[in-house]
Amino acid sequence: MRILAIATRVIKELIRDKRTLTLMFVAPIIIILLLSVLFSANSTTNVKIGTVAVSKTIRSNLDNTKHVAVKTYDSKKQAKKALKDEKIDSIIQKKSSGYSITYANTDSTKTTAVKMAFKNAVTEDTMTTMKNQMGTMKTQLQTTASALTKVEQLLPAKTRAKLASQASTPKTTTKVTKVAKTKVTNHYVYGDSSTGFFDKILPILMGFFVFFFVFLISGMALLKERTSGTLDRLLATPVKRSEIVFGYMISYGILAIVQTIVIVMATIWLLGIDIVGNVFNLVIINLILALVALAFGILVSTFARSEFQMVQFIPLIVIPQVFFSGIIPLDSMADWVKDISYIIPIKYSGDASTAIMMHGAHLSTLGLDIGVLGGILIVLTFLNIVGLKRYRKV
Amino acid sequence: MTDSIISLTHLVKKFGKQTVLQDVNLDLMPGEIVGLIGPSGAGKSTVIKTALGMEVADGGSATVFKQTMPNRQLLSRIGYMAQTDALYEALSGRENLQFFGKMKGINKKNISTEIKHAAAVVDLTEDLSKRVSGYSGGMMRRLSLAIALLGEPELLILDEPTVGIDPALRRQIWKELGSIRDEGRSILITTHVMDEAELTDRVALLLGGRVMAFDTPQNLKKQYEVPTIEDVFLKAEGVQS
Ligand SMILES: Nc1ncnc2c1ncn2[C@@H]1O[C@H](COP(=O)(O)OP(=O)(O)OP(=O)(O)O)[C@@H](O)[C@H]1O
Ligand SMILES: [Mg+2]
């Protein structure tokens, strides 16, 4: 009963704070739109490709592609040095077995651009080869045909008739060079084929928005309750400390659900991004994350004396979450760096959301992520309920 | 003293190195208004907060309704008004009253009559639908008092309730406090307005971390050989410094 009254009150206050509300829903959409433009517009990216032992036709095909420049190197070593010095964005090397392509991959749009350009160049090359071969075949066929006619006239009439019936299926002995599908091996200096794509950061970004806003707004709200004295007044009534915390959880949980739905809808409708899994599952994950953010917000607010001090916690609590969330691959980093990522809530929500959005994972397969988030949530909530003892001893 | 509502004995309270309350003894009987006066910073608010269990005492004991504070269940029988207004500014006056009413555990049936009555006492009936952010300072103070009055608590603890309230309304509020006392309920009130101290049943003068004098206004005036409580206050403070 009291829990609900607190939740309704908090929601009422939130709804009346129009500016904050607008920011919560509009800011994520604007940022997502901006990012999608940044990450998917590859038409204007200029790329430089270094080639080693690549045929002239492919080179000129590449060179003719818009926004692509080609530089030829004598050895792989030279090319690699150029790649390292950022003079070129990738190396295409012809090997006996096929092509080996190395991408710097620091900018995924460039990687995509190189892949596209190379594919087109090879296709064009194959087409030209095929055209040439067709031409040769044609002349060969013509010569064969005229030779045959000559031979035919020398043959007796009976054999001639027999031959005519077979003429529709002429057997040519011309050796056709089979156009094998070009074998391409890709190497990435940085990350892998899926690094940095907008699709990949979207789930993390969504978690980030939920976390950031819920953390900040709830922290501020609780801080205000404390500094304005309403918390004291609240605690001067027989309300339980846990009822206050749970009341806040309900209201901010609802807020996070709405925010997640808005962000998901915006990504589906405005960006046309496919979400393989169930949107409902996504909402659940973000709801848990929001409750974790709320718990963080309440906890941190007790250490802040003013709203300005609350803001100072953003670099400490929120920013590291982004770095360790999986946006930057941590595989190659030192062990202790990897260890930090195990206590980063956004990492788990990001992993889970990625699995849902890209692979259609069901909640039941995301036990680990949900479990860890739930664990963090329980610990923090407990700390908060106990922490309110600072303001009332019972 | 057996049936006292509030009983503070040898109460000690320190903030860091500063000892605010050295030895405070105070009791409040049913159907009594006790005024707590003393210079600013004497520790009046601290006495109240310690009695309510919002601060832990460093020594001595505080019992309310014969039970040691802090005690959560007892809080439903106490109406507390803090020195700061402590209102939700985004909500209207009525919503504030409703919210705190629910927190106090007033049952649904009575809540609207309770609100009506409390609002009438502080003359806020007309402005209940307004958001608190649009209230004047005095209106906020009145709303804060109305919240404390909700639920007809047996004990009212009011920390400077009449600051910024006009004389006519102040008189009305004191009339209400009088009738609350006549119902047998008790009130502990702090004030800097010495005229109000005259209206209480007993006055406690807090000075130097101790209750220097605790008696009826008449007896205090006699004791200090002065015509008003204000003179009592000034004389006591003069002796102290
Ligand atoms: N939370 C606190 N931390 C540290 N010191 C405090 C705290 N609360 C009060 N004090 C100190 O205790 C002393 C008494 O404060 P208190 O608020 O009880 O005074 P008061 O008698 O109510 O004064 P006023 O009439 O101005 O309201 C002051 O010196 C104040 O600085
Ligand atoms: Mg005070």
Image (tube, grey):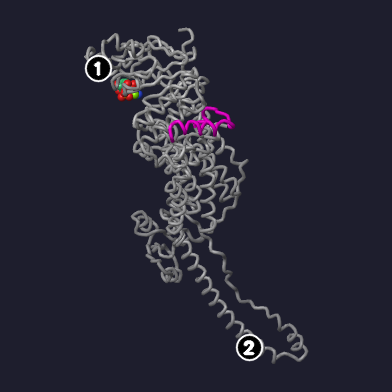
Question: Who is closer to the viewer here, B37 or B229?
Answer: B229
Residue at far top of view: B2
Image position of B1 with respect to B128: above or below: above
Is residue B55 highlighted in magenta? no
Up-down: is A128 above or below B80? below
Percent x, y of residue B207: 29, 15
Give how far across and how far down residue A288 sits, in percent. 54, 39
Q: Nearer the viewer, mark 2 or mark 1?
A: 1
Residue tagged by mark 1?
B234
- Name the kind of residue labelled 1 in the image: Leu
Q: Could you tell me residue B48's position as x and y percent?
A: 39, 20
Corner quadrant of residue A133: bottom right
Q: Is residue A291 left or right of residue B158?
A: right
Q: Secondary structure at mark 2?
A: helix
Give the amino acid type for the residue marked by disc 2 in the picture: Ser
- Residue that label 2 marks: A146
Residue at 59% over, 41% down = A366
Q: Quadrant of residue A85?
A: bottom left
Query: Is residue A341 found left or right of B16 in the rendered image?
Result: right
Magenta residues span B100-123
